[in-house]
Image (cartoon, helix red, strand yellow):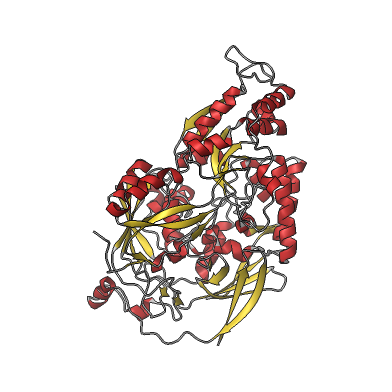
């Protein structure tokens, strides 16, 4: 008998409660493998399946039925920063995972886990005999290697907030080769949920046997590798190049890096016109009949220039499964008209963010005049009243969506109408009065307002055309509304990678994006309610301060109060106290109008070829819930091949 600890999270209440489930040992299974791998075993180029699987492989519950081997799952990808196209599809293998309906945290890489009564200590038991994609053992030493990198200021100058508590960073220790302990200085009631979300990947994505060669403390001859790499100036830049985080392009450009994912890269991102990942022969999951996963042989992404090309490929039957970039109202009519031609149908995507189109002023702007103005509440209120949200919904989103601020969605258990609706009235007169009242009452010959320095007050918005959310179209309308009240908003197109580099370093005036935290992910993904995390593009310097008070910029008291409120969520394991603290945080944050929301969506859609099976429908996705990656390994083509 073995003890498996599970944490169940109620979507209705957001409450976390521990339960202990005792189950018998896994029944004996006659393991089977894909024909392509069986052929390699036969010719001696690959060990037998029993030698490649863990002693106790994870048995994946199939969503529909046992699958068939074969086929290539085809998608399309944009150049320059579209790495989440891979991240969300094939790579979310963490110590624990969310169930397909986003209702329960389950075991995954960890065979079992235990949580202390005070929620400070988390102990994970790994799977004996589990291996990386190159056949090297995966053990506690790999997690300890990540922990070494995590604590090295040269390699990790800024620590991800989920691994840092009020008293400091998590302490990770090796109990034995298969057991690792994570210990915090105070209760961390959300740690398991966070580990199941996207950024839980850090702990299990640093293969020591491969990456140690690029680290000066492990390889005294590392300079030879630096000299051989034109893109590296020293060993630190070499290590960052080879060990780039999974949510950055660098990870997907390195086809040599071993992985625990169901497919491993053979043609990297940007190296050719088609990126390809092939079945991982050492993948550690099987279905309930003992068939090694994944079912599908390969995953391929054709690199294209724009969304229109992706749509055309879908119409031609060249896209097997995809919602990214195309699953938006503006594309629905054309996709519907071409369903028969492309041999696909629709599936639902529960993409319920706190807002899908948000104006984010940089509240840490290095320009002192701009910084003072955008940090004035009346300025943000004026901009909010200047925007005609309903016109944006009608013209850009074809009537789909609801005018709202950045706030929990109406489907969230803690939704409050005042949060979503305040300052959303289209009222240019009120906007003008607010701007005049704060001293921006002087204008130039073209009718644009002058700043206190006598120069035209101009803000440059960076815009990337991503996710099918039509940010450029929205921003052009916003710039027109702003001009009507005398504000000069300039729109500058940028690719996602460049935009995020600028925004992360606070070298921008403003930009338009979306935010998670629309439903229960607000507990662990609150970055538009409090400056915490790596995506706080509206206040990146405050976010840095929140992780380490010696860095970034110290925020004013009303922002510090948000950090304090969120501590009430993270430092207790009591569900009722967590919810009360979250409501307090959201109430404070929305009252300050830190960001300006335009439109809340009611979900999206994707397309799947008519013979694709075992995909979640509806597929929940919000913020750091990187789906369908935990379940893609069980996708299969009925008939064992793509439709013609």
Is 550 placed left or right of 260 in the picture? right
Q: Considering depth in this image, is 45 or 98 the residue closer to the camera?
A: 98
Q: Considering depth in this image, is 56 or 387 the residue closer to the camera?
A: 387
Looking at this view, name the residue that lies furthest to the top: 445
Q: Considering depth in this image, is 203 or 365 the residue closer to the camera?
A: 365
Task: Say which quadrant the C terminus sits in.
Answer: bottom left
From the top left corner, tell me how far across and down residue 528 is, in percent: 63, 46
Residue 41's quadrant in the figure? bottom left
Task: Say which quadrant the N terminus sits in.
Answer: bottom right
From the top left corner, tell me how far across and down residue 558 is, in percent: 76, 42
Q: Is residue 548 above or below residue 184?
A: above
Q: Is residue 116 above or below residue 489?
A: below
Could you tell me how many numbered marks the image carries?
Answer: 0
Q: Is residue 49 above or below residue 610?
A: below
Task: Work out whether residue 250 can be spotted.
Answer: yes
Is 597 placed left or right of 419 in the picture? left
Q: Is residue 47 above or below residue 245?
A: below
Task: Work out whether residue 251 can be spotted.
Answer: no
Residue drawn at point x = 50 percent, y = 86 percent: 25
Residue 213's quadrant in the figure? bottom left
From the top left corner, tell me how far across and down residue 220 is, in percent: 45, 57
From the top left corner, tell me how far across and down residue 187 is, in percent: 71, 65
Q: Considering depth in this image, is 153 or 7 the residue closer to the camera?
A: 7
């Amino acid at each position: 008998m073995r003890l498996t600890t599970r944490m169940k999270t109620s979507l209705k209440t957001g409450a976390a409660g521990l339960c202990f489930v005792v189950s018998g040992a896994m029944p004996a299974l006659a393991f089977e493998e894909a024909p392509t791998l069986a052929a390699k075993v036969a010719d001696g180029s690959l060990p037998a399946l029993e030698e490649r699987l863990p002693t106790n492989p994870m048995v994946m519950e199939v969503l529909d039925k046992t699958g068939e081997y074969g086929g290539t799952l085809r998608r399309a990808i944009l150049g320059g920063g579209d790495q989440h196209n891979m991240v969300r599809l094939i790579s979310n293998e963490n110590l624990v995972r969310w169930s397909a309906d986003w209702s329960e945290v389950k075991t995954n890489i960890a065979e079992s886990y235990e949580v202390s009564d005070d929620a400070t200590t988390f102990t994970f038991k790994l799977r004996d005999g589990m291996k990386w994609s190159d056949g090297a053992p995966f053990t506690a030493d790999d997690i300890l290697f990540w922990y070494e990198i995590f604590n090295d200021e040269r390699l990790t100058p800024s620590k991800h907030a989920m691994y840092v508590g009020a008293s400091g960073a998590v302490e990770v220790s090796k109990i034995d080769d298969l057991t690792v302990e994570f210990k915090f200085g105070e209760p961390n009631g959300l740690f398991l949920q966070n580990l199941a979300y996207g950024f839980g990947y850090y702990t299990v994505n640093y293969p020591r046997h491969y990456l140690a060669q690029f680290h000066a403390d492990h390889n005294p001859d590392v300079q030879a590798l630096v000299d051989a790499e034109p893109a590296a100036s020293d060993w630190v830049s070499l290590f960052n190049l080879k060990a780039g985080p999974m949510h950055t392009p660098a990870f997907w450009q390195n086809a040599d890096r071993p992985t625990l994912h169901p497919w491993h890269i053979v043609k990297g991102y940007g190296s050719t016109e088609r990126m390809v990942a092939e079945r991982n022969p050492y993948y550690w999951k099987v279905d309930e009949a003992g068939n090694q996963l994944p079912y599908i042989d390969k995953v391929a992404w054709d690199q294209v220039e724009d969304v229109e090309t992706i749509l055309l490929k879908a119409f031609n039957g060249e896209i097997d499964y995809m919602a990214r970039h195309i699953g938006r109202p503006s594309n629905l009519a054309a996709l519907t008209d071409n369903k028969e031609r492309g041999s696909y149908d629709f599936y639902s995507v529960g993409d319920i963010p706190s807002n899908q189109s948000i104006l984010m002023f940089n509240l840490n702007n290095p320009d002192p005049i701009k910084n003072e103005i955008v940090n004035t509440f009346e300025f943000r209120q004026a901009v909010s009243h200047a925007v005609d949200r309903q016109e944006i919904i009608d013209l850009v989103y074809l009537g789909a969506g609801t005018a709202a601020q950045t706030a929990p969605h109406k489907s969230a258990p803690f939704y409050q109408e005042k949060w979503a609706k305040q300052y959303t009235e289209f009222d240019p007169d009120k906007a003008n009065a607010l701007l005049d009242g704060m001293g921006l009452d002087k204008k130039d010959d073209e009718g644009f307002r002058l700043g206190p320095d006598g120069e035209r007050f101009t803000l440059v918005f960076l815009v990337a055309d991503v996710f099918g959310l039509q940010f450029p179209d929205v921003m052009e309308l916003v710039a027109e509304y702003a001009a009507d009240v005398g504000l000069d908003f300039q729109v500058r197109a940028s690719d996602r990678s460049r935009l995020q580099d600028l925004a992360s370093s606070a070298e921008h005036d403003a930009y338009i994006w979306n935010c998670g935290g629309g439903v229960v992910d607000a507990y662990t993904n609150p970055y538009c309610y409090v400056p915490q995390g790596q995506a706080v593009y509206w206040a990146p310097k405050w976010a840095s301060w929140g992780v380490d008070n010696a860095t970034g910029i110290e925020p004013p008291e009303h922002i510090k109060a948000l950090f304090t409120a969120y501590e009430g969520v993270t430092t207790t394991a009591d569900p009722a106290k967590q919810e009360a603290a979250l409501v307090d945080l959201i109430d404070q944050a929305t009252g300050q109008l830190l960001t300006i929301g335009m439109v809340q969506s009611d979900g999206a859609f994707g397309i799947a070829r008519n013979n694709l099976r075992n995909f979640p429908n509806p597929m929940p996705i919000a913020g750091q819930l990187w789906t369908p990656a935990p379940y893609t390994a069980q996708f299969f083509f009925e008939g064992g091949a793509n439709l013609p």
